[in-house]
Image (cartoon, rainbow, N blue to C red):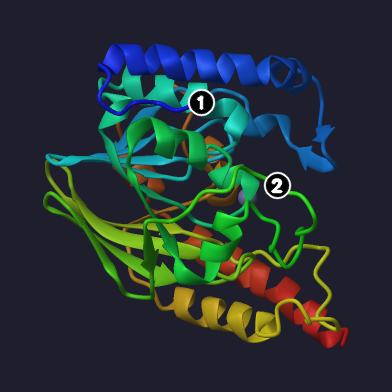
């Protein structure tokens, strides 16, 4: 289905909702159950469970589901969306954004933490709907363009998510600009080759916060360091990310999964505005240490 970018916003919204509802009726039913497997992929019900969107700090908002974190940045020149979650929950993300008072069609830039279906499953449909520019770390560009077929870990004959062509390739320390917003890209590979983190300032009433949207380098249990044919630099890349990420300076931190940065321990759904709830450097350091310990354990098994 082709969506004409010139149709009015309300028409576009109806098109999008119709498009989504036609595609996903069976999936919505299955998500009501316990962990389900679709095409061999196990999906956690927390990934599709709705969560009330909220303002994190200044012009930064949480618009994801209970566990799949999506972030919205508001600028005078439009919106930036980081991560889409699953394809099945695009309608949830759209209504989250709109319930905060924003027009979803005003998303101008699309970013992601990593090119895996749980973070970019809705990228293709959202890009078609909004006409936004998709910017992807150059090392994840191929996986995005073939929908995960070339993913070193899960890749195979079929795409795992809708393939989507990036409009711009990102590299370490690139700066993304929209309005007055400046976002520094940090190449932090693991688990995908082009996983990346984002560092930027937000201005709240009394404070200016340095925010890190971290991609946490989790070594998937399926990874075998004795066989790295499909990703020869995997050991070096993960090691690089642990070292670089440990040196980062920030005030508030977040991740691609709510469970990774403890959203539900730090905040109850519906709580009032409180940026400082996310000032937790010790939690970040501990997670990074735990992940590195797992990595070292795997290395020691070689
Ligand atoms: Zn994930």
The spot of residue 242 in percent (x, y) is 55, 77
Against 73, is 97 above or below?
above
Image point 54% across, 31% down: which residue? Answer: 65
Against 282, is 107 above or below?
above
> Which residue position holds label 2?
160
**Is 95 on the left or on the right of 65, as rendered?**
left
Badge 2: residue crowd in 10 Å (few <14, some 14–19, many ≥20): many
**Is 110 on the left or on the right of 215, as rendered?**
left
- Whether residue 273 can be seen here: yes
Image point 59% across, 71% down: which residue? Answer: 193
Against 115, is 59 above or below?
above
> Which residue position holds label 1?
1
For label 2, being within 8 Å of ligand 1 is answered no
For label 1, being within 8 Å of ligand 1 is answered no
Most foreground residue, 301 or 153: 153
Image point 66% across, 68% down: which residue? Answer: 291
The spot of residue 19 in percent (x, y) is 53, 19
The spot of residue 257 in percent (x, y) is 57, 46
Which image quadrant for residue 237? Answer: bottom right
The spot of residue 129 in percent (x, y) is 39, 30
Helix, strand or loop at mark 1: loop
Quadrant of image for the C terminus: bottom right
Judged by depth in the image, the label closer to the viewer, 2 or 1, is 1
Q: Distance between the residues labelled 2 and 1?
A: 20 Å
Helix, strand or loop at mark 2: loop
């Amino acid at each position: 289905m082709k969506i004409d970018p010139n149709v009015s916003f309300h028409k576009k919204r109806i098109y999008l909702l119709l498009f989504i509802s036609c595609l996903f009726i069976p999936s919505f039913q299955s998500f009501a159950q316990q962990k389900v497997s679709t095409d061999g992929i196990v999906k956690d019900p927390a990934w599709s469970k709705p969560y009330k969107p909220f303002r994190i700090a200044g012009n930064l908002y949480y618009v994801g589901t209970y566990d799949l974190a999506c972030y919205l940045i508001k600028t005078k020149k439009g919106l930036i969306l980081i991560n889409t979650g699953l394809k099945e929950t695009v309608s949830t993300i759209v209504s989250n954004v709109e319930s905060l008072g924003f027009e979803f069609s005003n998303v101008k830039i699309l970013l992601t933490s990593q090119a895996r279906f749980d973070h970019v499953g809705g990228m293709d449909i959202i890009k078609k709907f909004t006409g936004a520019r998709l910017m992807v770390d150059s090392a994840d560009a191929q996986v995005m363009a073939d929908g995960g077929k070339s993913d070193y870990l899960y890749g195979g004959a079929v795409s795992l998510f809708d393939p989507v062509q990036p409009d711009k390739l990102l590299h370490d320390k690139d700066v993304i600009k929209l309005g007055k917003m400046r976002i520094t890209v940090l190449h932090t590979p693991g688990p995908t080759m082009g996983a990346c983190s984002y560092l930027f300032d937000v201005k709240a009433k009394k404070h200016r916060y340095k925010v890190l949207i971290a991609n946490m380098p989790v070594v998937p249990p399926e990874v075998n360091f004795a066989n790295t044919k499909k990703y020869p630099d995997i050991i070096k890349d993960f090691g690089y990310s642990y070292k670089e990420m440990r040196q980062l300076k920030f005030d508030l931190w977040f991740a691609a999964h709510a469970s990774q940065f403890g959203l539900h321990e730090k905040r109850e759904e519906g709580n009032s505005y409180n940026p400082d709830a996310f000032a937790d450097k010790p939690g970040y350091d501990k997670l990074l240490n735990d992940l590195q310990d797992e990595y070292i354990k795997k290395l020691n098994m070689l």
